[in-house]
Each structure stands twice: as structure tokens, then as C-alpha cells.
Image (spheres, rainbow, N blue to C red):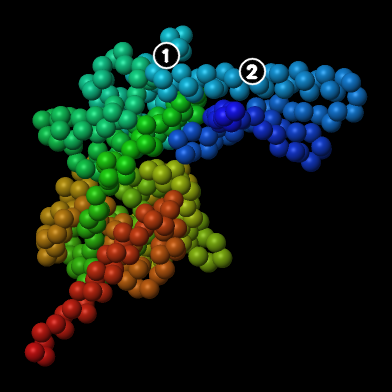
Amino acid sequence: MPRTKKPTKVKEPIRLRTKVLADGSKSLYLDIYRNGKRTYEYLKMYLIPETDRNARQQNETTMAAANAIKSKRIIELTSGEAGIVNHKDKVYLQDWMQTYKENQERRDKKGISQIKSVSHILKDYAGERFTLDRIDITFCQGYIDYMLTSYRPKGKPIAASTRNTYYQIFNGALNAAVRAKRILRNPFNEMDKSEKPKMPESVRSYMTIEEVRALIATPMENEKVKSAYLFSCFCGLRISDILRLKWKDIFVDNGQYRLSVAMQKTKEPIYLPLSNEALRWMPERGDKTADEHVFELPTTVNQLIKPWAKAAGISKRFTFHTARHTFATMLLTLGADLYTVSKLLGHTSVKMTQVYAKIINKKKDDAVNLTNGLFD
């Protein structure tokens, strides 16, 4: 007789597993493995030691409930992959973007205006009644292409950095939808890296030490603006943080002047030591109270500093933010390490500071290459 072939055992995409706890009980969780990725869902359900009949019955009830949840998750997973939609759970993309924006606002996150912009783009791209369950890899690729080829606010294409920001925001919104169990997966995670927008290499304009000396030596019509710019050159604060700086934020600690601020852009608190050169450009406090601002500046700061730079013989791109770049490059040029500079700038990651290290390395290369051809 021919040998009967055993049926192939089909692996379940979701398995119910247990984790032994210190008290002897077992925590139940779902082990979800799909498309090469593993995730876990802890059910907050527990099996207790079976010391008597009541304990055994309680565990049987708990296991039945856990298996019911497992079955439901398998149906949700396979239905989603087959394109079957539960109409009771339909969520419009525009409604989800509004929910995402409100959640970010409650968490005091930055970028709320960019989330609004992304919502407008998605409305133009997909309409108002497009549902979350219809988002797939083709939709995400089309969203990126739409920004590249069709989206023209004010009649002009958006910058590559803006396109990258809008991709990151929509990607974040979809990740939040996965966590909220509104969708099963984020299609952006299935896209090849080469298909995703990239942040272009940042070009940072900064002043050399010689140019800072020239600025100090050059008079300016509004000396308060000049002082604020040079103060930033020696402490690295953004204009937004300088405008918010109050006298109560500045204190002396063991003879060292410091300032304590929560940076407006990143919300990152920093405790920044102030050098004598930075203190030199701070205005006199006089009779100002602790709640009064250190610097009183006009709203046209960038327009006022351009003629001053020109008078100092500086022709490169010049904005108030170049002072912050100048602070970073000056410290690295003088030998400060990258980690320390990162902390002084209030960066949340050293990666954000590495662009300045590239600038310094380029300066070293240029300096060495000055000798090329001298002895030919």
C-alpha cells in the first residue's frame, strides 16, 4: 500500500504564549509573526497556580477568554490582508489626521502646523472620504510622487527638506494608527529605502573667528541687535530663545554664570554656562525685575543685520541663525568634543551635531591642500 502523506501543519500567524512571573503566576500574551516581523500583545490576563479545583476552573475560564481574543486577532489580521473591511470600524483618513494632530498637541509636541499641511496635501491627493483601511504601499508611493510632481503651493515645488518632513509626519501618523489598532500595519515599512524621501545634506553658513572679529569692530545702527547677535555667537541660543530669555533665567553657580532655559523649538531644557565673552554682550540689568526680558529687539532683526555684515566685508549668506552655527563651528575648531557641543546646543542627539564636524573636517582638508603645487 502506498504510504499516506501526512498533512502539512499550517503555522498560525498568532500564538498564545505564557510568561512565568516571580509570584508563580503566568502572564498571557500573543506572539504575532507576519511578513518576517514579530510583535507582541500582552493581554493583562493571568493563570494562577492550580492549588485546588477553583483555581483550575478560573484558569480554564481565563484561557477560553484569551483564545477568543487570539481568534479575533487572527480574523482581523487575515481579513485585512485579504482586503475584507469591517464597515463598522471605518475611519476616514482626514478624521485620523485630526485625531493625530490633537494627540500631538496634548503631548506638547512640535510640528503642529506641518501636520495641518500634510492633512491638506492628503485631502488634495485622496479626497475627504478616503478611509484608513484602503491605505497600502501603492497609496504611500503615490503620496510621495504627488508631493514631487503635483503639489505646488504658491505655484512652486516644495523643497526636498520639506518633502522629507511631510513624509515623516504621515509615516508617524500611520505608526500611531497601528498602535491604536486602526490599521494592521504601516505600508511605509514595506517600501524600499531608496523609494523614500531623503533629507538633503544641510548647508550651514557660519562666521569664521576672523569674521566675528570684523563684526565686533564694525559699528551698527542698532547696538542692541548687534549685542544679541554676538551674544548668540558665544552661547549658541536661537533668536526665539533669546527673545524669550528673562533675567530670572540667569544665575551664578559657584562663581560661574549660567542660564537655564527650555528651548522653544525642541522643548529640551538646557543649563548653559556663559563665557566672559558672552557676558560682555549682555545688556546691563539696571532696575529690571526677574520677569523682564534680557533683550528688547525689533521684529526686523534679519533685515537690520544684513547691512552690518556687508559693512564688515562679509558677502556670504547672513541671518541671525548663522550666529548659532558660528558658536558650534568655533567650539569644534578650538578643540571641544562633539558630545559637549551637542549638549551646549541642546540637541537631542549627537547625530544632529555631526554636520558641524563635517564642516570642520572640510576646513582641515582645505587647509592641508593649500600646500598643493607650492613645490612643483
Task: State which quarter of the image contains the C terminus.
Answer: bottom left
Residue at 46% x, 47% y is 268
Q: Quadrant of residue 206?
A: bottom left
- In the image, residue 133 lies at what x, y percent? 39, 19
Look at 45% across and 35% down and name the residue there.
35
Residue 16: quadrant of the picture? top right
In this rendering, would 310 be left or right of 83? Answer: left
Residue 196 falls in which quadrant of the image? top left
- x 44%, y 63%: residue: 339
- Quadrant of the image for the N terminus? top right
* Residue appearing at x 20%, y 48% in the figure: 302
User: Taking the image as drawn, is residue 72 in sight?
Assistant: yes
Residue situated in front as seen by the camera: 334 or 350: 350
Q: Identity of the amino acid at label 1?
A: Val
Q: Which residue is mark 1?
A: 85
- Label 2's element? helix
Q: Which residue is mark 2?
A: 68
